[in-house]
Amino acid sequence: MLHLLRSLTPSQRSAVIASYLGWTLDAFDFFILVFVLKDVAQEFHTDVETVTYAIFLTLAARPVGALLFGLAADRYGRRVTLIVDILLFSMFEFASGLAPSLAIFLVLRLAFGVAMGGEWGVGAALAMETIPPGARGVVSGILQTGYPSGYLLAAIAYFALYGLIGWRGMFMIGVLPALLVLYIRGKVEESPAFLARAGQRPGVRLARLPRINELRAYARRFFYAVLLMTAFNFLSHGTQDLYPTFLQLQHHFSQHTVGLIAIVYNIGAILGGLSFGALSQRIGRRRAIVGAALLTLPLIPVWAYGAGPVALAVGAFLMQFAVQGAWGVVPVHLNELSPEDVRGTFPGFAYQIGNLLASANATLQAGIAETNGGNYAFALAAVAAIAGVVLAALAIFGPEAHGVKFAGAQVNPDDRSTGRPCPDTK
């Protein structure tokens, strides 16, 4: 892994760093809400289930952002689109901390969702199109660990700062990702694949906008990607979004205990993403996803029904190792499956449509818990088990394009990848 990273050129490393940090800070802004659901409910004199509609609206709006920013990235370039997107989601996050009413808070979370939806696809395309094929698995794991890294930062901020700044202050520090724009402007170059497709010299940022009929030509593959990402999102959001609430309401743990457990399971998530992302370079994308998805099943009892904070922390660490292990393969898998002309749009839009279809998860789980006398453990376990099985089945029977060559890709002399599509590419 370290050898592959050292073999990258400075421009390739900068693209990876920018894409990783963009997703990290985007996730940081998103996950702040899961720690303060109870506080927001108290502030606006409602219940937790009602406030979970903020999560629903954020997730539901993400496909809009993925489409808008993806099309912009395919026309104007990955770099400039990423800059605009980061500025917007930082601004909406800060404004959420100033919301005077629940209605305005929900509108702001909707707007944040549009901006959040654009970051992953654009950033992943920028990184994957810049690096050599042999580094994709490792870099995929790094990119996707941005999500648990952001969750980890949110947990640390909640643990260390909540008592000083309150829930509104937690949202206001979410403006900090805007500083990443300075790094992108100074260090990151445009994707060579975008420039090659556009037939232009570096510095020029204009390509033909993909036509709707071109997007329709890839409908079968896109439909499969959406189904896959729906299962992925039910698994991740079903094991993450209400876990702090579960610890607070069902186990009555303190703020510090909840924060510490969240820190522990996000470390597991980061390690899992790195491990399975790198493993996918050796055994293939589908096998890595299937292995990680099935690993979640025997972990459910200790993760949802562990006795005491230590057992729950261990279970959560292992669960997120497996869940985010599967996710560590997603950036490379979707980008390799994506048609060349719409790589700025296809992966992110499929990902976020899957998010839309899974966006009611938090409200669904909260409703199941309330129906069963506040039993969040049952709600969490049921969704995790079903999502893990469905994800494994979809991955087993789906296509793969391990090592496919991207236009304009820079291949290092010691890159072991052939750069050709695998025989099972569909």
Image (tube, grey):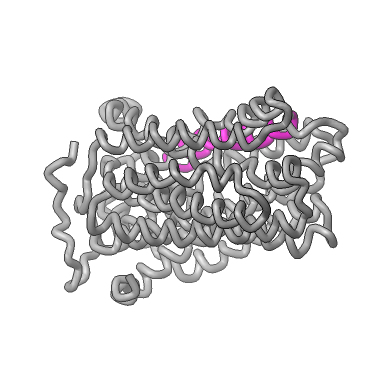
Q: Nearer the viewer, residue 257 or 204?
A: 257
Magenta-drawn segment: 50-71
Where residue 341 sits, quadrant-wise, is top left
In percent of width and height, residue 404 lies at: 20, 50
In percent of width and height, residue 371 lies at: 69, 23
Residue 117 lies left or right of residue 125; in this view the side is right
Residue 8 lies left or right of residue 406; in this view the side is right
Q: Nearer the viewer, residue 364 or 261?
A: 261
Q: Is residue 277 above or below residue 297?
A: below
Does the image show residue 77?
A: no
Q: Is residue 136 above or below residue 398?
A: below
Q: Residue at x 42, y 61 (%)?
A: 142
Q: Residue at x 24, y 51 (%)?
A: 284
> Is residue 343 a member of the stretch shown in magenta?
no
Where residue 250 sits, quadrant-wise, is top right
Residue 142 lies left or right of residue 400; in this view the side is right
Q: How many marks?
A: 0
In percent of width and height, residue 338 lies at: 29, 41
Does the image show residue 29?
A: yes
Residue 302 lies left or right of residue 371; in this view the side is left
In percent of width and height, residue 66 lies at: 48, 39
Q: Nearer the viewer, residue 405 or 284?
A: 284
Q: Is residue 49 above or below residue 291?
A: above
Main secondary structure of the magenta stretch: helix
Looking at the rendered image, the quarter that the C terminus falls into is top left
> Is residue 70 a member of the stretch shown in magenta?
yes
Q: Residue at x 32, y 30 (%)?
A: 224
Looking at the rendered image, the quarter that the N terminus falls into is bottom left
Furthest-front residue in view?
307
Q: Residue at x 64, y 49 (%)?
A: 307
